[in-house]
Image: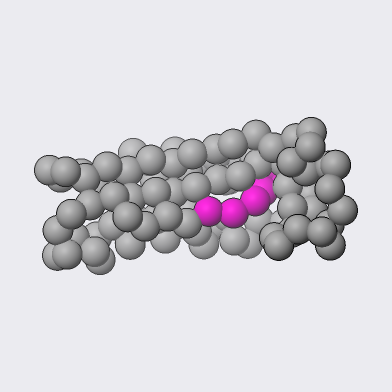
């Protein structure tokens, strides 16, 4: 299994387009699965804790995104790693 993710301050049209295109291009195979998750943050998770009291910054975190791939065959490692890269690149540079 391989997962990548991060926090987003907003869901821009560009981010949504890339995540939808990435979901449509997800590889498949016997015993394999992929998913892109979007979690709406709010309340206690993003507002009720001092920023320096947690291990990971959640400043301006309105959304959490994850691209998850699970597969069994080692020969598929590259294919699944490449699948999640567009999401990782785009979301990493989102302000």
Q: Is residue 66 left or right of residue 56?
A: left
Looking at the picture, does residue 93 appear above or below residue 47?
below
Q: Is residue 64 left or right of residue 33?
A: right
Quarter of the picture containing the N terminus is: bottom left
Q: Which residue appears farthest toward the front when viewing the image?
A: 53
Q: Is residue 95 left or right of residue 38?
A: right
Which one is in front, 18 or 26? 26
Residue bounds of the magenta highlight = 5-10
Q: Quadrant of residue 28?
A: top left
Looking at the picture, does residue 89 appear above or below residue 34?
below
Which one is in front, 47 or 83? 47
Looking at the picture, does residue 75 appear above or below residue 21?
below
Quarter of the picture containing the C terminus is: bottom right
Residue 39 visible from this viewpoint: yes
Q: Quadrant of residue 81?
A: bottom left
Magenta region, main secondary structure: strand
Q: How many marks?
A: 0
Q: Is residue 74 left or right of residue 9?
A: left
- Is residue 34 inside the magenta stretch? no
Which residue appears at 51% of the width and 62% of the height? 89
x then y, percent, for residue 68: 39, 49
Residue 25 visible from this viewpoint: no
x then y, percent, for residue 33: 27, 42
Which residue appears at 22% of the width and 52% of the height? 71
- Colour convention: one colour
Which residue appears at 75% of the width and 35% of the height? 42
x then y, percent, for residue 66: 50, 47
x then y, percent, for residue 21: 40, 42
Which residue appears at 76% of the width and 58% of the height? 54
């Amino acid at each position: 299994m391989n997962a990548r993710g991060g926090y987003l301050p907003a869901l821009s049209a560009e981010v949504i387009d890339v995540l939808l295109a990435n979901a449509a291009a997800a590889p498949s195979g016997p015993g394999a699965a992929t998913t892109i998750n979007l979690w709406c943050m709010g309340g206690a998770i993003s507002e009720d804790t001092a920023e320096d009291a947690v291990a990971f910054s959640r400043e301006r975190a309105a959304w959490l995104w994850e691209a998850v791939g699970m597969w069994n065959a080692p020969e598929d490692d590259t294919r699944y790693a490449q699948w999640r890269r567009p999401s990782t690149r785009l979301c990493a540079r989102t302000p």
